[in-house]
Amino acid sequence: MLRQASRLLSRSVTAGSSKSTTARAFSTEVPSTIDSTFVESWKKVAPNMDPPQTPSSFMKARPTTASSIPTKLTVNFVLPYASELSGKEVDMVIIPATTGQMGVLPGHVPTIAELKPGIMSVHEGTDVKKYFVSSGFAFLHANSVADIIAVEAVPLENIDASQVQKGLAEFTQKLASASTDLEKAEAQIGVEVHSAMNAALSG
């Protein structure tokens, strides 16, 4: 049944593509609609099953882009268990991207950045709040909104330097004595995270 559905659907897609070669708009720029051709083909193959919804059925419309660059950057900073910042308007954030430290100002080009262990700083006037983040992603939108999701984060002033040194020594020893790939990987992660924390505290 699924093979037959695939053949029918591929025919409709091929026929539709041959009629028009114009560029399609982004999926978030058009309203969520149901392809009538797809629904008709689906009903021929599986009349007792509702047609599946496509990803565009669940997507929200793309936020409007302001005609001028805002003076503030709106930051949402969340963890799996808490929301650190929600709709916070700041001047700038600096995030530890895997490609290097990335400064984000209002009007930043839309970007998705992967985070590595390091310092994220939130700048609001002369006030600077620093967090140590373990990993995560930053989603920078065209409307000067930054959604930052971290696996783990802690304010820099809450980190105990002596515990960091102790942890770094323990994981370094584990890495040296690891006998399996899993043990080496776990120890290497521990060394990298504790080294990054140590560098953050000493820098």
Image (cartoon, grey):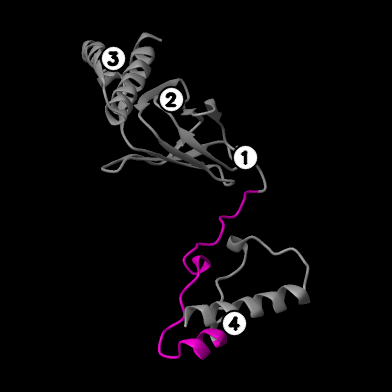
Looking at the image, residue 185 sits to the left or right of residue 107; the answer is left
- The residue where tag 3 is placed is 176
Quick check: marks 2 and 4 in contact, CB under 8 Å?
A: no
Find residue 175 and report its horizontal and vertical position in percent: 29, 18
Residue at image point 57% right, 57% down: 62
Residue at image point 43% right, 83% down: 50
Residue 56 colored in magenta in the image: yes
Q: How many dots with numbers?
A: 4
Looking at the image, residue 66 sits to the left or right of residue 57; the answer is right
User: At label 1, which amino acid type do we have?
Assistant: Val
User: At label 2, which amino acid type do we have?
Assistant: Ser
Find residue 79 and report its horizontal and vertical position in percent: 32, 40
Closer to the camera, 83 or 32?
A: 32
Q: Earlier in the sequence, mark 2 or mark 4?
A: 4
Q: Which marked residue is nearer to the observer: mark 4 or mark 1?
A: 4
Looking at the image, residue 14 sits to the left or right of residue 140; the answer is right
Q: Regarding mark 4 in the picture, which secondary structure is present there?
A: helix
Q: Which marked residue is nearer to the observer: mark 4 or mark 3?
A: 3
* Mark 1 to mark 3 CA distance (whole Å): 43 Å
- How packed is label 3: few (under 14 Cα within 10 Å), some, or many (20 or more)? few
* Mark 4 to mark 3 CA distance (whole Å): 59 Å
Query: Can residue 35 be seen in this snapshot?
Result: no
Q: Which marked residue is nearer to the observer: mark 1 or mark 3?
A: 3
Closer to the camera, 139 or 125?
A: 139
Q: Regarding mark 1 in the picture, which secondary structure is present there?
A: loop
Please give the range of residues in magenta.
40-66
Q: Earlier in the sequence, mark 1 or mark 3?
A: 1
- How packed is label 1: few (under 14 Cα within 10 Å), some, or many (20 or more)? few
Q: Which marked residue is nearer to the observer: mark 2 or mark 3?
A: 3
Query: Can residue 86 be seen in this snapshot?
Result: yes
- The residue where tag 2 is placed is 121
